[in-house]
Image: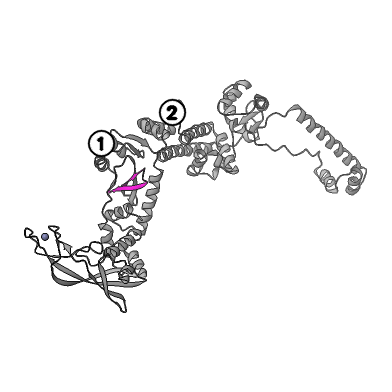
Amino acid sequence: MKEAALLALPEGMDIDQIQITQTGLVVSVRSTTPSSRCPLCLEPSSHIHSYYHRTLKDAPCVGRQLQLELSVRKFLCQNPDCSRKVFTERIPDLAEPWARMTTRLREQITSIGLSTSGKAGVRLGDRLGIETSRNTILRRIMDVPDDARASVVYLGIDDFAFRRGYQFGTILVDLESHRPIDLLPDRRAETAAAWMRDNPDIHVVSRDRASAYASAASKVAPQAIQVADRFHICKNLTEATQLLLARCQAEIAAVSHIEEPVQNESGKPIVSIEQWRPKEPAHVKEVRLTRRAGREARYKQVVERHEQGLTAKEIACQLDLSERTVQRWLASGTFPEAKKRRKKASSFDEFASYVLKRWQEGERNGLALWREIVAQGYTGSPQTVYRHLEPLKQASIQASLNPDRLRKFTASTAVWLFVRDPKSLDEVEQEDLVTFCQASPTLKQTYDLVQDFMQMVHKREGHRLDIWLERIATSELPELQTFATGVEKDKAAVKAGLTWSINNAQVEGQVTKLKLIKRTMYGKAGFPLLRQRVLHAI
Ligand SMILES: [Zn+2]
């Protein structure tokens, strides 16, 4: 019958009658298959024993509630060896034997539950014409069976805050299928180990730096290669750098409070590092002095005419100057020097504090200094270095800085200048960074080491890790040395993390999704419910 097809009823079901009531549609349906199989012995039987009625709620039809009045038959089992004498016919495509709703309605409620939650699900169902309750929805969510999944080979594991800050769970992600495969109610090593024991095909465990998952994997999955996640490695380095910055900032602040003397003991003028300019090339100096002489001659002419009693306007007219200039010169009473050259940004700036430190240590050989900074990445010529050293012979440069510029930073904001890709910094940030590096050779050294590590991370150059660790060992940076000690303890996994393309970025993504789900449940969800919703999220 056409109507049966319209309502997508299983084959063999016929519609007897459709009634429109105030609440929706009531459809009388009966089964027309000539025989049915005994559920116990599986023998077919066509001997009808009796009829009875079942009422099933069905999925809504064009916004109307749909109720099926089902006429079901009971059959006599004809197998003499079977203990079942009478059985009810099964309609597996429509509903479970004792269910009060059709399978398709149950699936719809499950979907609503998995994408909303109890209360919100009731409201959404109401809009869609599905009458349901919070308890039904929660029961549906809990009834979803775990997927029969293939064994996991690439496992990503991480923790998440379950109750903010004081209860943590563990999320396990199949890095190949990009699906969360399980949630554990805590983040203890034993719990993770028990799970891994049930999954013997694990080849790779991508994990954070906390030791619980590491020890779990070593214990029960010794065959698996452990990969320390890059995200967490970088996070650890960032934290170490932040501690170092906090210490250096305190030192910088202490120094900047000391009044700067204008001269030092030897009588040399003191110039701050920001004012440190290279010696002018001879031809530039010549041009500057010629201009200065020209201006001085003009000034003398102005004064002479003024003494002769000429007005400013007359002088301006005679000498082809503006009246304002004449007034200004006369008012100042002295020869007006040209404004000082503005310091141009130079590739040398980054290395200024280092060169200064070496100069103060007694290094006077320009070529040697040039070689040292070339080794650190300087690309300028030796001549530029010579020209910078020239003024040091006449003055004493102090590694001062503009403390206002750095005052706006806390260690936690400044640290991003150090760890981010320098190409992503805007102009102001770049200048801030240069100021930091000039403020202290320690910071400059820190910056170079941190950036070198970041290069290793981004370019997957795990083979350079040992050299980097040696550089840290010989540095005098205790905060980075603590970080390095942590890396040494977990070196194989860190090296794998810096070499392999695999990483936990998608696990972080799953944790974000989990947090979102948790929020839609108003934080009241128990662990089993959260687990169901995360694993079966739509
Ligand atoms: Zn039977």
What's the residue type where badge 2 is placed? His
Q: Position of residue 42 (x, y in %)?
A: 15, 58
What's the residue type where badge 1 is placed? Val
Q: Is residue 76 above or below residue 495?
A: below
Magenta range is: 170-185
Left or right of 336, for residue 62: left
Name the magenta segment's main secondary structure. strand
Q: Position of residue 172 (x, y in %)?
A: 32, 45
Quadrant of image for the C terminus = bottom left
Q: Quadrant of residue 295?
A: top right
Neighbourhood count class around disc 2 (C-alpha, 10 Å): few under 14, some 14–19, many 20 upward: few
Quadrant location, ligand no. 1: bottom left
Residue 233 painted magenta: no
User: Badge 2 is on which residue?
Assistant: 463
Disc 2 under 8 Å from ligand 1? The reply is: no
Tag shown at residue 220: 1
Q: Residue at x 38, y 52 (%)?
A: 513
Visible residue check, residue 364:
no
Q: Is residue 198 above or below residue 481?
A: below
**Which mark sits nearer the N-terminus, 2 or 1?**
1
Question: Residue 312 versus residue 409: which sits nearer the camera?
Answer: 409
